[in-house]
Image (cartoon, rainbow, N blue to C red):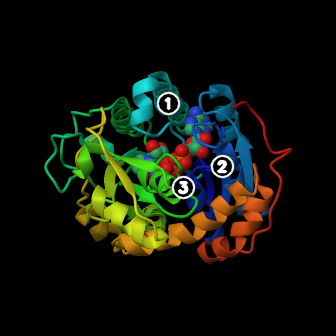
Amino acid sequence: MRVLVTGGAGFIGFHLVRRLLRDGHEVTALDNLNDYYNPALKRARVEAIGTHTAFRFVRMDLTEQEGVLQLFREKPFDLVVNLAAQPGVRHSIDNPFAYTRSNVIGFLSVLEACRHTGVEHLVYASSSSVYGVDSAVPFQTSEPAESPVSLYAATKRSNELMAHAYSHLYGFRATGLRFFTVYGPWGRPDMAYFSFTDQMTRGEPIKVFNEGKLSRDFTYIDDIVESTVRLIETRRSDGSFHVVYNIGRGEPVSLLDLISVLEEEFGVSARKEMVGMQPGDVYTTYADTSELERLIGYKAQVTLEEGIREFAKWYRTYRGELEMGSDNTGALVRGVDEDSKRHCQTSLTATSLRGEEGGST
Ligand SMILES: NC(=O)c1ccc[n+]([C@@H]2O[C@H](COP(=O)([O-])OP(=O)(O)OC[C@H]3O[C@@H](n4cnc5c(N)ncnc54)[C@H](O)[C@@H]3O)[C@@H](O)[C@H]2O)c1
């Protein structure tokens, strides 16, 4: 299949691209490499994908509507996986327009391009945050999810409604994925497990929101990728055009337990600073994945302890390289290459992004 993965230099996109290449697909990864978090990590991910005849990286912003449409027209895609978005709840309080820009206007560019180029299937990232604070646990996709408590969540719920309208109007299949707190190697530095690790291993205090009375359904990246790939390969028998699924582990873990797992793994004691609830945050996330399991025959398997161990192996090398002053990709990629190979059977060599970068950031 010819596949486009937007947000292909992002955490989930990077892992998915490697898996799709390994499965023999032709993959284009699109990303604007923005600086919401260190773009060197995004570049390092693209380098770690490596030179591969079936792979190309395109630097482009989704809001460049003409450019996006042209890319779709060059050689139409069979499958589009839209992962590019402005993530993060706290950031949406201070930078609201970044969310409407990437998550609403950018997503509309993708829908329009799907409409005009006959894409068969659009898979896109939604989020567990759409459930807000009123939904009963475990969260079921039959919940109305009409009360988002952050702009981030509101844009993700809007994506579901927009995808529904477009798949109904123009007859392509669309599948929304409500991801639940994804973590693992090559992860996102803004997420709690990663920023706590940074702070704890430097002896700095960590802010524990709502005094630790929060829980998250942590889901390991390999389980996310496996479920996504199986969903891509499964033809829905009921003929439905647009469906939304929860992709989570279904076992929420409290914030304090996460901290204990990190303390154990890194052999440090956290200096906890108990603070109140963050605006826009939710108390718990907990996925009911029974519908998904029935369809794809797979349930997330990796425990938090196992997943954090894998994250820690990668993190130690990553931090080591950063502290040695490697501000970009080369040494970082070489350093983690051995670990990377475990996650990707394909033999990949480092490549340069230069010459493959088009549009603007
Ligand atoms: N990681 C999680 O726990 C989680 C949970 C729920 C939902 N999601 C969703 O999954 C998707 C992937 O998340 P991630 O954790 O890999 O995040 P990420 O930030 O690592 O990846 C997103 C990528 O999209 C790119 N991007 C952002 N705006 C863009 C634009 N306008 N044009 C082109 N590229 C753009 C960024 O540069 C980044 O590399 C996102 O849509 C996110 O909202 C993630």
User: In the image shown, does 200 or 341 lie closer to the viewer?
Assistant: 200
**What amino acid type is highlighted by mark number 3?**
Arg
Judged by depth in the image, the label closer to the viewer, 2 or 1, is 2
Judged by depth in the image, the label closer to the viewer, 3 or 1, is 3
Ligand 1 within 8 Å of the CB at mark 2: yes
Q: What whole-number distance in Å separates the C-alpha atoms at marks 2 and 1?
A: 24 Å
Which residue is rendered at x = 55% and y = 54% of the image? 11
Q: What whole-number distance in Å separates the C-alpha atoms at marks 3 and 1?
A: 42 Å
Which residue is rendered at x = 65% and y = 61% of the image? 318
**What amino acid type is highlighted by mark number 1?**
Leu
Q: Quadrant of the C terminus?
A: top right
Which residue is rendered at x = 85% and y = 45% of the image? 354
**Residue highlighted by disc 3:** 202
Q: What whole-number distance in Å separates the C-alpha atoms at marks 3 and 2?
A: 23 Å
Whether 253 is drawn above or below 361: the answer is below
Q: Residues within 10 Å of mark 3 (few under 14, many from 20)?
A: few
Residue 99, x across and y down, in percent: 47, 29
